[in-house]
């Protein structure tokens, strides 16, 4: 299959970054709404959980040829710029105050010290996460690619699928299903390879084996996976596990593969210059959007904007302003590295994707 940009998958990247922002905005949640509205919020949250698995699938799909032929070089191509981006944004989120009112009235350290101490309480997990919760994606992706590169290099590629499935089950047992399976893990199992390896391997295998599902089957996978997730969430609520806390469940890979396959079957969907232009900025928006969201939380709070009006404003403004921030950072030569991972030394990898 060609490595050229596929319009429908580029559109999928945009849908996914919108979904990520919706997860973090948490609309229709809280005491301002009835219990039934909060349930709708949980459904929206779990529907949006296709997003990060979709990004992992995309990476596995587009890196498959290069990773198979040049595993070490491909991993290095990703690792160097992504580690730089991860370190830079971790530092930014460690430094930026979350509560502007506290920082101005009680001092900068009054706002920051508690968060720094929280991260220091679990240094290993912080290593697999970074300076802000959403940055876990980068160490997770590099963990998956690193494991895959090692297995390919030492001609143990046949172990990728069973290892990925094993880690995923371990992650479930020590994560969402911990109250039942009583599993344990050295880090929070959303982080590292527990979740990421299965999804990157799935994208890798879809391309390597040229596996295609019909549009009807793909749609059934998406809807079936979503239904399974909601059933799992309802079941686990009996163990006092809030549905919105589930990063991945048994149905998550099925849902993500369904929408990925559906978009792959319709490559011309979203074929417009705007889609292609915006999709190139998704990585930047992913790492930067929490800065915008922090500012908006403080701004809306200062004007006592709450409830439905806040929910109507927060996600759309975060999306628009985050893209604007990324465009600005791209224009400045000394900040471009914060939102772009392409390098002059890796032109032959120019069609590969992360986000």
Image (cartoon, rainbow, N blue to C red):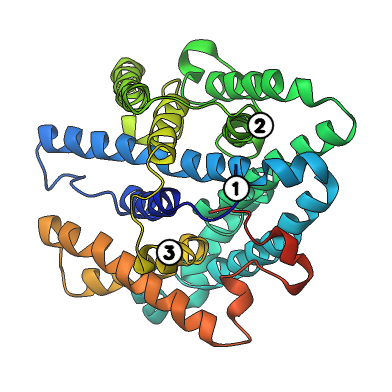
Taking the spot 65% from the left edge, 39% from the top edge, the residue there is 192
Identify which residue, 343 or 114, lies in the foreground: 343
Identify which residue, 12 or 300, lies in the foreground: 12
Residue 162: image quadrant is top right
Q: Residues within 10 Å of mark 1 (few under 14, many from 20)?
A: few
The answer to whether any part of residue 122 appears in the image is no
The answer to whether any part of residue 63 appears in the image is yes
What is the x, y in percent for residue 38? Answer: 18, 37
Residue at image mark 3: 276
Report whether 194 appears left or right of 83: left
- The furthest residue to the top: 180
- Nearest to viewer (mark 1 / mark 2): 1
Position of 136 relative to 306 (above/below):
above
Tag count in the figure? 3
If you read the primary sequence from the N terminus, does the residue marked by circle 1 or circle 3 appear first?
1
| Distance Cα–Cα, label 1 vs label 3 | 17 Å
Report whether 209 appears left or right of 55: right
Taking the spot 15% from the left edge, 44% from the top edge, the residue there is 31
- Nearest to viewer (mark 1 / mark 3): 1
| Distance Cα–Cα, label 1 vs label 2 | 12 Å
What is the x, y in percent for residue 139? Answer: 66, 48
Identify which residue, 188 or 261, lies in the foreground: 261
What is the x, y in percent for residue 293? Answer: 36, 65
> Helix, strand or loop at disc 2?
helix
Q: Which mark is residue 208?
A: 2
| Distance Cα–Cα, label 2 vs label 3 | 25 Å
If you read the primary sequence from the N terminus, does the residue marked by circle 2 or circle 3 appear first?
2
Position of 171 relative to 327 (above/below):
above
Identify which residue, 254 or 94, lies in the foreground: 254
Residue at image mark 1: 2
Position of 230 relative to 335 (above/below):
above
Taking the spot 22% from the left edge, 74% from the top edge, the residue there is 302
């Amino acid at each position: 299959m060609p490595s050229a940009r596929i319009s429908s998958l580029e559109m999928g990247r945009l849908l996914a970054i919108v979904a990520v922002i919706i997860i973090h905005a948490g609309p229709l949640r809280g005491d301002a709404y009835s219990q039934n509205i909060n349930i709708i919020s949980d459904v929206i949250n779990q529907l949006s959980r296709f997003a990060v698995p979709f990004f992992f699938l995309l990476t596995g799909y587009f890196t498959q040829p290069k990773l198979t032929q040049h595993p070490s070089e491909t991993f290095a191509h990703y690792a160097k710029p992504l580690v730089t981006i991860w370190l830079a944004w971790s530092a930014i989120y460690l430094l930026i105050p979350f509560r502007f009112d506290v920082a101005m009235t009680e001092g900068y350290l009054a706002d920051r010290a508690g968060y720094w101490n929280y991260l220091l309480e679990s240094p290993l997990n912080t290593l697999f996460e970074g300076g802000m919760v959403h940055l876990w994606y980068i160490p997770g992706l590099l963990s998956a690619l690193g494991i895959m590169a090692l297995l390919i290099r030492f001609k143990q590629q046949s172990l990728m699928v069973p290892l990925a499935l094993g880690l995923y089950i371990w992650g479930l047992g020590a994560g969402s299903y911990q109250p039942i399976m009583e599993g344990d893990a050295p880090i929070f199992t959303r982080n590292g390879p527990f979740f990421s390896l299965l999804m990157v391997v799935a994208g890798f295998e879809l391309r390597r084996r040229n596996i295609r599902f019909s549009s009807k089957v793909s749609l059934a996978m998406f809807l079936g996976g979503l239904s399974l997730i909601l059933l799992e969430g309802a079941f686990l609520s009996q163990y006092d596990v809030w549905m919105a806390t589930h990063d991945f469940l048994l149905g998550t890979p099925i849902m993500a593969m369904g929408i990925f396959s559906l978009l792959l079957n319709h490559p011309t969907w979203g074929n417009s210059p705007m889609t292609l232009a915006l999709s190139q900025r998704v990585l930047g928006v992913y790492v930067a959007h929490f800065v915008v969201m922090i500012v908006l939380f403080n701004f809306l709070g200062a004007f006592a904007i709450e409830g439905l009006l806040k929910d109507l404003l927060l996600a759309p403004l975060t999306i628009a302003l985050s893209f604007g921030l990324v465009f600005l950072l791209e224009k400045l030569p000394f900040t471009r590295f914060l939102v772009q991972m392409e390098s002059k030394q890796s032109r032959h990898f120019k069609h590969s994707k992360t986000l």
